[in-house]
Image (cartoon, grey):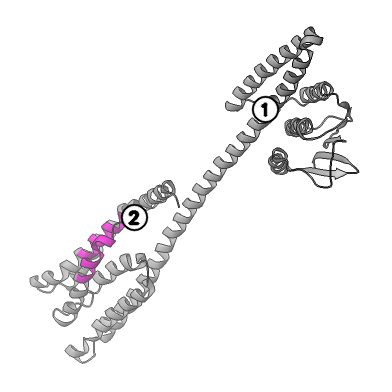
Amino acid sequence: MNTHALRLTDATQGRLRRLNLATALPPIIVAAVVVVAVDLHVWWHALILVPGAVAAVVAFERWTANDVGRVAVPCLIVGAVVWPLGVLVIDSPNAWWGVASVGSLSIPRLPRYRYAAGVALVGYVGAVGALRLLVDGGDDVQRFALIPAAVTALIMVLSYVGERFYDIVQELEVSKQREAEMAVIRERVRFAGDLHDIQGHTLHVVKLKAALAQKLVRADPERAEEELREINTLLTDTIQQTKELAYAQRRLNLTAELENAKNLFEAAGITVRITRESEPEARSSELLGQVLRETTTNILRHAQATQVRITLGAAGITIVNDGARGETLPELRGLSALRQRVHDDGGELTVSLREGEFVTAAEFR
């Protein structure tokens, strides 16, 4: 878990514990006062009972601040001393309340042996209460041993459940943070893919047109000048698209992409045939434009094609070229990234070799 996620979970748990402080501390204080008042028979009994009650209140306040570990040991010692004194010296059947309260707040947070420690606490409360046999022969064992041990066991169970609740809150916060981080990563991947679509495509086309202009500069200066003007226009358009991408305003026009692909293929000496059977839905039009752009770049860069057929229908687009070489598909990382985006939008992008032709198809169901 990273530092930011830890801060978030700590902040959430802190809010919950502060809420507990505001809602539960007054009843805890009232309970402490009642425990002392009920068993206070003479004034000096307070010297024994009050430290146990104070230890319980201090431990609860530190627990709400997520800092109970700092006071757990001294508070447990105080509560553990008060209980046998209450049993043997002042006849207090409720003096166990301090050690049970401190234990229920601190033991469930132990990194190890928390359940064994809980059992030991219940055993301690019951065993000390059983010392009442030394005083009255067993008449008050139920009041001093059985009931305190049973109530302590119940408190411990509720404490384990409560601590598990905080663990679940922490897990939910971590899960939420991880989902947010994954969303950021997905957006970065999407941005990188779009940037590749824009600039990778443009740079390759500029390379082709620059090479063509270099060949024509003497043989056909006017045509070379026209190619240079197109390069300038293409770069200007790419700069604008990059700005739109940065500000989340970029939208591809499928018709413009078809015309652009046609011009590029023809400039490279590739025969192109475009068949528009019907228009795709608006929701898929932009993704189909991206598939066409990426495929056009791949054909110009990697294939030795002489013919390209583009078929556009209501369900999607198919681009076929005769530049396939060999028996295996080349690695096309741009299309691999687009495949996931098409899938997320309810479509399927496939790339295959068929009878010496390279087929790229994107279909939406």
Total count of labels: 2
Residue 322 against residue 162 in the figure, above or below = above
Q: Is residue 42 above or below residue 198?
A: below
Q: Distance between the residues labelled 2 and 1?
A: 55 Å
Q: In which quarter of the image is residue 229?
A: top right
Residue numbers of the magenta segment: 55-77
Residue lying at 67% horizontally and 29% vertically, measured from the top left: 200
**Residue identified by numbered label 2:** 20
Kindly state the secondary structure of the residue where label 2 is placed.
helix
Tell me where residue 183 appears, x and y as whole percent: 56, 42
Q: Which mark is residue 262?
A: none
Image quarter where the C terminus lies is top right
Query: Looking at numbered disc 2 in the image, what kind of residue is underneath it?
Result: Asn
Query: Residue farthest to the front?
Result: 218
Query: Magenta part mainly helix, strand or loop?
Result: helix
Residue at (38% x, 48% y) in the render = 11
Element assignment for label 1:
helix
Within the magenta stretch, is there residue 72?
Answer: yes
Q: Residue at the spot x=17%, y=88% of the render?
A: 135
Residue type at tag 1: Ile
Image: 341 above or below 297: below
Q: Specify whether 209 is left or right of 95.
A: right
User: Label 1, on which residue?
Assistant: 198
